[in-house]
Image (cartoon, rainbow, N blue to C red):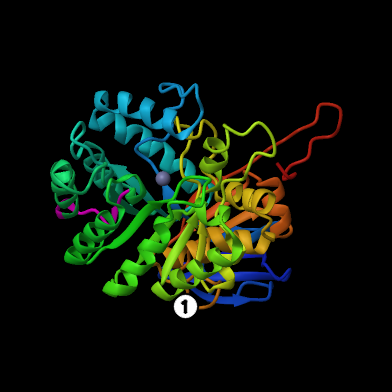
Amino acid sequence: MTTGALLLRGAVLADGTRADVTVRDGLIASIDRPGPPAPDAPAQVEDLSGCLLLPAPVEIHAHLDKALTADRVANPAGDLLGAVGAWLAYRPGRDREDIAATARAALRAYVGNGVTALRTHVDLGTDIGLRGLEALLELREEAAGLCRLQLVAFAANPLTGVAGAANRALLRDALAAGADAVGACPGLDADPAECVEICLELAADHGVAVDLHVDEWLRPEPCTLALLADAVLATGFPYGVVASHCVSLGAMEPDRAAAIARRVAAAGIAVAALPQTNLYLQGRDHDRSVPRGITALSVLRAAGVTVAAGGDNLQDPFNCLGRADPLETAALLVLAGHDTPQLAYDAVSAAARAAAGLPPVALRPGDPADLLAVRAANLREALSTASAERVVVHAGRVVARTEVHRTFTDLPAQTGTPA
Ligand SMILES: [Zn+2]
């Protein structure tokens, strides 16, 4: 790790120009044409020749407490019910140290790929109490210099009625312990409207955001997103709401989806598309033309909704693959969601930052110096090759550097080739 002022030399910017970027006190101090170092230039220099310099991505939706368990927890059916059943059977046996160890390994993979802020949901439940949350509260503190962690207390079902009393108590305990946001799956509760109301009330009491798993199915009904928008509009909830998944919106008639999207925009709700897990889990009951489990990206954007995207599950029973890389998420938005590379990267960076309530990073003097340099000539190439060769800057410090060395046995050795 490095500290102090930093000169990022010779990087390519998104507009194709090259620049020297000076970073001081955690902020971008100046962006200059490449040239000889000024007399007051920082002594610490990072040569970024051949690299594209981008605002660092934000992982808006992770499950660090589940990550990297795919080899322990099988999901032969490959669908959501199979994953939930396998996970609930497995998780009670885990202790806090084991959860912390896999979460730490996953977090390092995200940071190495460029993630400088990450929002993770953390399971609560009568079978595990607050074990997962306690492990991640420790990790949030331990890793503060690497990455800004936000913890969503992810309530178990049900949250409503007499049967939900224990889960409501756990959610209150998690917020008192320091969770950053309230999470739940209202669409799986017996009373989705009441579930949403409880989440908004508890979050308002603690002054924290709400981030819900919403409509994680390929049919248009039921649509919890509409209900959520109405509840936020009615209450004026002020602390930020993210609706994650929202797959049903992409499965309904476009005019109705547009009408709902306008209510979502009016409510100020950000939507997080999660292509990896939805593509993995959904549509397995179709024998042809398998649908893509991605929300209505263009309809939401046309209505003015902030559309972020996240990687969701990472090598666990909900998604056996994943490389903790927002460039993978962005590439899937291009391939399966038909976004442009620019829109796709915006979803995992600027839009994700906005959804997480973080200040913008647009490579301007005064912006936070949370940056990713990746070996590529432009954004399209960066999403194509997703080179492992990266330098990650968080709060003005280099926090990760990955170098790649490839040789071909029948050719002279070359360094710095795209990996
Ligand atoms: Zn999730």
In which quadrant will I find the C terminus? Answer: top right
**Can residue 183 be seen at all in this image of the molecule?**
yes
Q: Does the segment drawn in magenta span residue 196?
A: no
- The percent position of residue 275, horizontal first and vertical second, equals 56, 47
Identify the residue under disc 1. Answer: 366
For residue 217, side relative to residue 163 (left or right): right
Tell me if the residue at label 1 has its CB under 8 Å from ligand 1.
Answer: no
For residue 166, side relative to residue 343 (left or right): left
Residue furthest right as drawn: 410
Relative vertical location of residue 72 with respect to residue 237 in this rendering, above or below: above
Image quadrant assignment for residue 145: bottom left
Per the rendered image, the range of residues in magenta is 176-184
Callout 1: SS: loop
- Identify which residue is drawn at 60% across, 50% down: 327
Image quadrant assignment for residue 338: bottom right
- The percent position of residue 107, horizontal first and vertical second, equals 41, 43
Circle 1: residue type: Gly
- Identify which residue is drawn at 72% across, 57% down: 380
- The percent position of residue 243, horizontal first and vertical second, equals 41, 58
Ligand 1: image quarter: top left
For residue 171, side relative to residue 10 (left or right): left
